[in-house]
Image (spheres, rainbow, N blue to C red):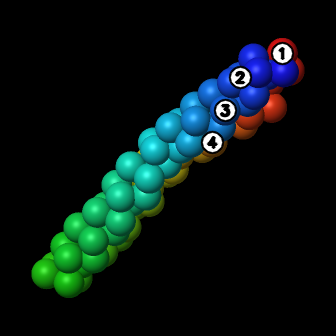
């Protein structure tokens, strides 16, 4: 009984720690958008190039967050 509770607590702690990477991805997305909007404000002619690069950067950052979510789900719902 006690071992099962420790395993469950370890799963919750591990899943929570795995989601720290999603917070980092959120910060990265915010900084990417901030930089792109600042660049667009300074040089409106570069809109198309900046938008394309911003969306690509957001996609890579979001992929990291999705990987963190998958790891958290694997930790939570793994059958022992």
Q: At 67% from the left edge and 32% from the top edge, which residue is drawn?
A: 9
> Do the numbered discs 3 and 2 sit on residues whose CB atoms are within 8 Å?
yes
Between discs 2 and 1, the one toward the N terminus: 2
Q: Mark 3 falls on what kind of element?
A: helix
Residue 76 occupies which quadrant of the picture?
A: top right
Disc 3 vs disc 1: which is toward the camera? 3
**Camera-side residue: 68 or 31?**
68
Residue beneath label 3, please? 9
Expressed as whole percent of the image width and height from the top left, the position of residue 68 reads 56, 38
Q: At 13% from the left edge and 81% from the top edge, which residue is drawn?
A: 42
Quarter of the figure with the N terminus: top right
> Do the numbered discs 3 and 4 sit on residues whose CB atoms are within 8 Å?
no
Between discs 3 and 4, the one toward the N terminus: 3
Residue beneath label 2, please? 7
Disc 1 vs disc 4: which is toward the camera? 1
Question: Gap between marks 3 and 1, in whole Å?
Answer: 14 Å
Between discs 4 and 2, the one toward the N terminus: 2
Left or right placement of residue 50 versus residue 15 in this view: left
> Do the numbered discs 2 and 1 sit on residues whose CB atoms are within 8 Å?
yes
Answer yes or no: is residue 31 visible.
yes
Expressed as whole percent of the image width and height from the top left, the position of residue 26 reads 43, 58
Q: Mark 2 falls on what kind of element?
A: helix
Between discs 3 and 1, the one toward the N terminus: 3
Answer yes or no: is residue 46 visible.
no
**Camera-side residue: 30 or 16?**
16
Question: Gap between marks 4 and 2, in whole Å?
Answer: 20 Å
Residue beneath label 1, please? 80
Question: Gap between marks 3 and 2, in whole Å?
Answer: 5 Å
**Camera-side residue: 77 or 37?**
77
Question: Gap between marks 1 and 4, in whole Å?
Answer: 20 Å
Residue beneath label 4, please? 69
Q: At 16% from the left edge and 79% from the top edge, which residue is drawn?
A: 43
């Amino acid at each position: 009984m006690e071992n099962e509770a420790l395993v469950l607590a370890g799963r919750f702690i591990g899943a929570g720690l795995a989601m720290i990477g999603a917070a980092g991805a959120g910060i990265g997305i915010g900084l990417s958008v901030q930089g792109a909007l600042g660049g667009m404000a300074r040089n409106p002619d570069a809109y198309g190039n900046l938008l394309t690069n911003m969306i690509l950067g957001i996609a890579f950052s979001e992929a990291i967050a999705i990987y963190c979510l998958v790891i958290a789900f694997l930790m939570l719902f793994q059958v022992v």
